[in-house]
Image (cartoon, rainbow, N blue to C red):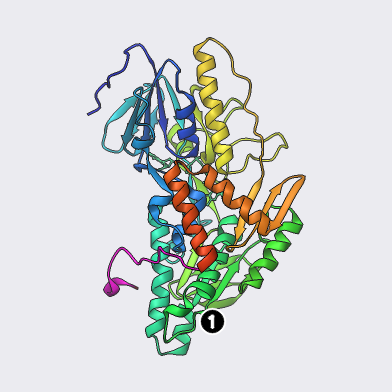
Amino acid sequence: MMTEQARPAEAHRVVIVGAGFGGLEATYRLAGAPVSITLVDRRNHHLFQPLLYQVATASLATSEIAWPVRYLLRGRPEVTTLYATVTGIDAQARRVLLDDGDALPYDTLVLATGARHAYFGHDEWEPFAPGLKTLEDATTLRRRILVAFERAERETDPQRRAALLTFVIIGAGPTGVELAGTIAELAQDTLPPDFRNIDTHKARVVLIEAGPRVLAGFADDLSAYAQRALESIGVEIVLNQPVTECTADCVVYGGHRLETKTIIWAAGVRASPAAEWLGAPADRAGRLEVLPDLTVPGHPDIYAIGDTVVIAGPDGKPVPGIAPAAKQQGRYVAEAIKARLRGGTPAPFRYKHAGSLAQIGKRKAVIDFGRFKLRGALAWWIWGIAHIYFLIGLRHRLSVAISWLWVYARDQRAARLITQGSSKVAR
Ligand SMILES: Cc1cc2nc3c(=O)[nH]c(=O)nc-3n(C[C@H](O)[C@H](O)[C@H](O)COP(=O)(O)OP(=O)(O)OC[C@H]3O[C@@H](n4cnc5c(N)ncnc54)[C@H](O)[C@@H]3O)c2cc1C
């Protein structure tokens, strides 16, 4: 059972659920405030999701993009870190309910529980077309990709071999584009000398998008550039085609059946059940509709931030589900809590969009800062520097920089490890 930790009994109790970008930022920014904080997460690590695809494609190791939350907050005696899963909120009693029956009392609650991928009503596709959200997802995808090449090496039937060497990515947003580009480079540049019976240059990487262009959130010219850049490294792009079926052997779109053994889902997200926990209004993606001060309607003591909420930005469009938005909201909530404790009323949250970035293979990227747009090799360097800057800690920055330089200079992806079982279960 929960025990009261060594903290002043009179301190205002803030419970933060989720140690992702939003929750961790709120925790950091509450430093020095007269509060005791309990940070709860069902994972013991903070995950840098923007680089998950690099774990899935064997460029980085899991430990290069994740950090134990407890370690990150070791210098903050007023913060208690709990490894636990939240299953509900008793808003009347001001308690957060955990899956083991335990409960955490709060004075102020911050919900920062993020989102997961969604299959638009086709959850049965998930086993055949896994998405990318956690470290487990990334190592599962890495396993599937590498096992497909291994099985192709031993396959003598040309049709079955072709299916094993066909990699389909559904959804051409930044994650889909980054995955497609990196898998193509894996097949074209990294793997060819390692295999004897197959020519990995012949692997097909097919990126399927329901909308009319790749990187729909970017300016038209950048998305056209991204398409050309992907095609130049061998990615086949299918536009305006919603997928209608995914199975263990194929994907179907526009009445066409494409034989494949590896499908990756990068198409849609659904918010965590935070809105359901509170019976609060939500949009079609399950995102909680918060008030301008990021509190939940009818619950002034409960804030919700990041991917699990929807709120309009200054342009009237929803604030995008990206890390800087979650961090801005985490920062805002920390300041709002401090202001309230001083007796003040915080001004409404105002989102500032810094820009969008996407990598296309190891030497190209696109950057859309609104008025300022960039593409090509320089954009790739800026993309790389920006990501290294946002990693936590010198050791991770150095390690990721070295891994990237190795890929850049030698085409070698060192993390080509098939884990989670031997060849007997490699199906
Ligand atoms: C593959 C991928 C690539 C991306 N690329 C980019 C990019 O290039 N640039 C960019 O800006 N953004 C990118 N994003 C989006 C970005 O990662 C999210 O917008 C950001 O993580 C949202 O932060 P958050 O704090 O709302 O949620 P998250 O960072 O997802 O954190 C939510 C936390 O809540 C915890 N949690 C959830 N439910 C519970 C529960 N019931 N009990 C306890 N804990 C719980 C989770 O374990 C997690 O730690 C990417 C996302 C993915 C998946």
Magenta region:
411-426
Judge from the rendering whether residue 106 lies leftward or rightward of residue 374; answer left or right: left
* Residue sticking out furthest to the left: 1
The quarter of the picture where the C terminus appears is bottom left
Residue at image coords 49%, 39%? 21
Q: Nearer the viewer, residue 43 or 198?
A: 198
Instruction: From the viewer's perspective, tell me whether residue 150 is left or right of residue 290.
Output: left
Residue 116 placement (x, y as % from top left): 47, 49
Q: Is residue 213 left or right of residue 266?
A: right
Rendered residue at 27%/31% (across/down):
102
Residue 360's x, y, as percent?
Answer: 61, 61
Image: 121 above or below 153: above
Q: From the top left corner, tell me how far across and down residue 217 is, in percent.
A: 67, 51
Tell me the quarter of the image containing the N terminus. Answer: top left
Residue in the image at 52% along x and 59% along y:
405
The residue identified by callout 1 is 202
Q: Is residue 233 visible?
A: yes
Number of numbered discs present?
1
